[in-house]
Amino acid sequence: MPQILSPDEFFNAPGIILDVRSPAEYAHGHIPGAVSFPLFSDDERAQVGTCYKQQGKDLAIELGLTIVGSKLTQFVQTAKKLSPDHPIRLHCWRGGMRSSSMAWLLETAGMQVSLLEGGHKAFRQWVRSTLATPQAIVTLGGMTGTGKTILLNALAERGEQILDLEHLANHRGSSYGSLGLPPQPSNEHYENLLAVQWVSLDRDRPVWIEAESSRVGLCRVPDEIFLRMVESPVVQIERSRSERIAILLEVYGSADPEELIAATQRISKKLGGQNTQAAIAHIREGNLAPAIETVLDYYDKSYLYDLMKREVAIYPIDVSGLSDSESVDRLIDKSREILSEKQVSAQELVINRK
C-alpha cells in the first residue's frame, strides 16, 4: 500500500513528483518541480466527466478503464525512466481515484509510491497558509532604471535573503516588462512558486523584496505578501539620470523595435500624444536614449505618486557612481540600522505598556 502523506511530509519525502492530472490542469498550476504524468488527456478527461454526469459513476469508471487500459505498459516504462530505482511521489486533484489507480499500477510494477493526502487541493490550501506566515521585510525601492533587480541579485550573492517577484512572474513590472522574457505563469502557479520560496526563508532574518504594485504584469502579488510589503520600511535607491538611462539601455537596447513601439503605445494615454509620437520616432531611428528619457518622466511621476501613498519610513540611499558591491554594502548597513531601530522601538513600547 502506498504511503499517504500530509503536504509537509510529501514535500520533504524523497523521489520525483508525478502529477497525474490532465495537461490543462497541470498547465494552470502545479507543484513546482512536479512532472506532468497525466492519466487522461484533456479530451479523455472531458469524455469521462461527461459520461459521469449523463450516465453515472459506474459507466464513467468503465470508460476510464477502457481509455487507460492500452496505456498501462507505457505508464510503467515512463515512470521507471523518470525515476529508476528511486521512490515516486504522486497526486491528482483531490487524492482520489486517478492517483490511487496510478499508485496501484506502479506499486504492482515494483516501485515505491507515496501519495499526497487531499491531492492538489490540499497543496493549494498549504500555499495559502504558507503565504500567511509572518516574515520581516525590507522593501527595495527606487525609480525605474535605478537597478533594483541588479542590486537585489547582488544582495543574494552576498548571502541576504531575497524574494524576486519579477523573476518568478517572468515580467519586469512595466509596459515594457515582458520584452525578451518567457510567457508568464498563471496567477495560481505564481502563488505556488512564491509559497515554495516563502517556506524556505529563515524567519529570524529579513527578506528583501523589490517594491512593486499589486500586479507584476498579469500576475497578482498575493495579499498576504503585498500587505506586508506596503507596511514595511523602504530603502530607496537613488542614481543620476544618466546612469538610469544607461541601465535601461543595457536591458532594452537589443529588444525588437516593433515590440518597444507597441509597449510605448500601451501607455500613450498617460504619456500624452505628443510624447508618445516623439518616443516612437526615436525608437524608429534607433536612438533609444531620448525615447527612454521621455518615458522616464511618466514612470517617475507614477512611482512618486505610489510612494506618497505608503505611510512608512523611507530611507534614501544614493548609489550614483558606486559599484554593485559598494552599493550593497550601503544597503545592508542601512537595513541593519533600520531593524535595530525597530527592535528598540518595540522594546520601548513594551516597557511603556508596563
Image (cartoon, rainbow, N blue to C red):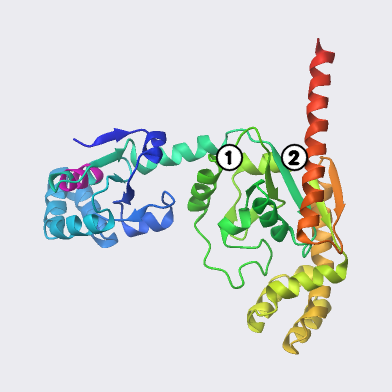
What segment carries the magenta color? 99-106
Q: Position of residue 162 (x, y in %)?
A: 64, 48
Q: Which residue is pictured at 76% across the width and 90% down the height?
A: 285
Alpha carbon separation for disc pair 2 and 1? 17 Å
Is residue 70 rendered to the left or right of residue 49? left
Quadrant, the C terminus = top right
Counting labels gives 2
Q: Which of pointers 2 and 1 indicates the residue nearer the eye?
A: 1
What secondary structure is marked by label 1? loop
Estimate the x, y position of residue 143 in percent, counting from the top left: 80, 59
Quadrant where the N terminus is found in the figure: top left
Foreground: 81 or 7?
A: 81
* Disc ID at residue 232: 2
Q: Residue at x 39, y 36 (%)?
A: 7
Is residue 214 among what the camera can see?
Answer: no
Percent position of residue 343, x then y: 78, 28
In which image quadrant can residue 23 be found? bottom left
Q: Is residue 343 left or right of residue 78?
A: right
Q: Tell me if label 2 and label 1 are in contact, CB under 8 Å.
A: no
**Residue 201, which numbered label?**
1
Most extreme residue toward the bottom is: 285
Residue 200 in which image quadrant: top right
Magenta span includes 102: yes
Q: Amino acid at mark 1?
A: Leu
Asked whether the viewer can see residue 64, the reply is yes
Q: Is residue 116 left or right of residue 133?
A: left
Residue at the spot x=83%, y=74% of the render? 293
Residue 333 shown in magenta: no
Where is 271 relative to 69, above or below? below
Q: Position of residue 253 (x, y in %)?
A: 70, 79
